[in-house]
């Protein structure tokens, strides 16, 4: 028997619970098989060089005007406390608390005019899909990772094409790796979190014995599908194949084992804090863990096509400048700049695209609590890798950072560029919804001509 041990039981917001163990053996109805665990997490909204994407979701929306778009000529109640520093690209300045990115600005593209979040509500949906969640198709729009999984599939056995380094949080969108939408659970993100990550290999179970059990698994799955009325088991065959691949290969376990990494590389990324970051009155967000940037690189090298990771809790309605200076930007800057340098040093930068952003920007005016509130009119982000034409800034806002002054950049344009870099034509490639209707992978947007 193969047991994946855990020490707690999590109750999700949709009522699903994650059992504290996983067994492949007698297939007892009370046990939870690895395929079922993958299915449950997907239902809960959690789950050599090749073309790939690493997407960093900055949960809660970071202050664009305190990172890439400082406004020194604005009044004090708008410009804030952060000061600019020069980068290695003449004429480009960014926040003083981002010295790592400043040092490698020739390998980056700051975006100063991102728009597309219509509601101003906290939700990672726009980052992962580039679409409005309202009035979507049955099942919802699929994330970029799920679409790439559907169109391209895995690169090798034992490595899911879509991986999510996302936490368990009370506000589900902060912990989302990107949802599969109408593509179903077979294309959900695999989330290699928790103690089970150390046991994703066959411990004392031979491949032959596991193959025999595959037939039994198929029979159980066929029965379940006949009696399941709400289609919740659709995609389970694909999940079963994924689970068996993980168990019969050590690639994923090795990629997740940071003890196998060069200690000097580990030191470059730094330790950070693996715990979810808690903000008073706002609750918990994602960890500030630069080692997730390293894990993303290792998973891409192992064969993943899309890796999403969630970093921090940037909803700074209070004490914005304390949070920027002391709790978030130093670790974010170190992790992201090291990742970008690492990709270049390993010869991966032309193939691996990196994007870091949140769901919207923050208000120009600083509120009475020294914070910035929600501002869906404009936000920012950073691109790197993917063979892009880097060392340039795209977009601009007005003197106050309140409105786009030139070159608006929609989330969909960035997604179209990422798909283009993956070899997927965003204006010809389609995926079918639950009714069989085809949809383009992005909605009317073109790859950004400045970058390709």
Image (cartoon, rainbow, N blue to C red):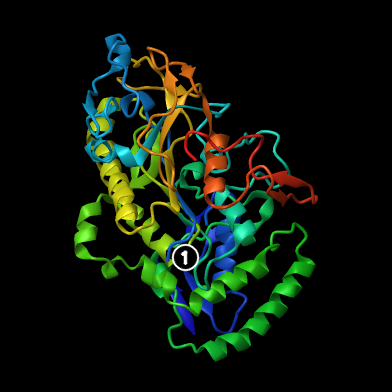
Q: In this picture, is 163 found above or below 387?
A: below
The residue drawn where x is 42% and y is 34% is 381
Residue 5 relative to residue 186: left or right:
left
Quadrant location of residue 394?
Answer: top left
Of helix, strand and loop, which one carries label 1?
loop
Q: Nearer the viewer, residue 203 or 261?
A: 261
Query: As drawn, which residue projects farthest toward the top?
Result: 75
Res. 356 visible in picture:
yes
Q: In this picture, is 40 found above or below 360?
A: below
The residue drawn where x is 37% and y is 14% is 365
All told, the count of numbered labels is: 1
Q: Position of residue 237 (x, y in %)?
A: 67, 70
Q: Nearer the viewer, residue 244 or 429?
A: 429
Q: In this picture, is 179 found above or below 1?
A: above
Res. 32 visible in picture:
no
Residue 153 relative to residue 269: left or right:
right
Which residue is the site of mark 1?
A: 303
The residue drawn where x is 24% and y is 59% is 266
Q: Nearer the viewer, residue 27 or 156?
A: 156
The residue drawn where x is 57% and y is 70% is 242
Q: Position of residue 262 (x, y in %)?
A: 23, 65
Q: Position of residue 303 (x, y in %)?
A: 47, 65
Q: Position of residue 222 (x, y in %)?
A: 74, 74
Label 1 crowding class (10 Å Cα cut-off): few <14, some 14-19, many 20+? many
Q: Nearer the viewer, residue 273 or 290?
A: 290
């Amino acid at each position: 028997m193969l047991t994946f041990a855990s020490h707690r039981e999590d109750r999700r917001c949709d009522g699903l619970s994650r059992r504290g163990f996983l067994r492949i053996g007698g297939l007892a109805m009370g046990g939870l098989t690895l395929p079922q665990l993958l299915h449950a997490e997907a239902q809960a909204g959690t789950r050599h060089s090749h073309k790939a994407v690493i997407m960093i979701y900055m949960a809660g929306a970071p202050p664009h005007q305190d990172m890439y778009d400082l406004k020194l000529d604005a009044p004090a109640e708008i410009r804030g406390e952060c000061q600019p520093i020069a980068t290695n690209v003449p004429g480009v300045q960014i926040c003083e608390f981002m010295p790592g990115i400043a040092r490698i600005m020739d390998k980056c593209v700051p975006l100063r005019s991102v728009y597309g979040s219509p509601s101003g509500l906290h939700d990672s949906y726009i980052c992962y899909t580039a679409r409005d969640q309202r009035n979507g198709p049955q099942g919802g729009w699929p994330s970029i990772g799920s679409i790439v999984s559907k169109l391209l599939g895995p690169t090798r056995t034992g490595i899911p094409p879509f991986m999510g380094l996302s936490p368990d949080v009370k506000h589900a969108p902060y912990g989302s790796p990107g949802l599969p939408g109408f593509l179903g659970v077979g294309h959900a993100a695999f989330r290699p979190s928790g103690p089970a990550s150390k046991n994703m290999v066959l411990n004392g179970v031979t491949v032959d014995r596991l193959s025999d059990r595959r037939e039994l698994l198929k029979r159980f799955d066929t029965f379940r599908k006949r009696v399941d009325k709400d289609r919740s088991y659709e995609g389970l065959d694909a999940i079963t194949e994924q689970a068996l691949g993980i168990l019969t290969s050590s690639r994923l376990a090795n990629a997740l084992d940071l003890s196998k990494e060069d200690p000097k590389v580990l030191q470059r990324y730094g330790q950070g804090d693996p715990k979810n970051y808690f903000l008073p009155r706002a609750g918990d967000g994602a960890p500030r863990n630069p080692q997730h940037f390293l894990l993303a690189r290792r998973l891409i090298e192992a064969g993943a096509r899309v890796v999403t990771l969630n970093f921090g809790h940037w909803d700074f309605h209070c004490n914005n400048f304390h949070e920027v200076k002391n709790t978030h930007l130093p670790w974010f800057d170190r992790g992201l700049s090291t990742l970008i340098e690492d990709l270049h040093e390993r010869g991966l930068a032309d193939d691996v695209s990196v994007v870091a952003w949140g769901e919207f920007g923050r208000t120009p005016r600083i509120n009475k609590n020294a914070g910035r509130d929600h501002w869906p009119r404009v936000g920012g982000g950073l691109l790197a890798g993917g063979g892009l034409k880097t060392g340039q800034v795209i977009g601009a806002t007005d003197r106050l950072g309140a409105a786009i002054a030139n070159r608006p950049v929609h989330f969909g344009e960035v997604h179209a560029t990422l798909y283009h870099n993956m070899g997927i034509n965003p204006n010809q490639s389609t995926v079918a919804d639950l009714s069989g209707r085809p949809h383009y992978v992005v909605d009317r947007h073109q790859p950004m001509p400045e970058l390709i």
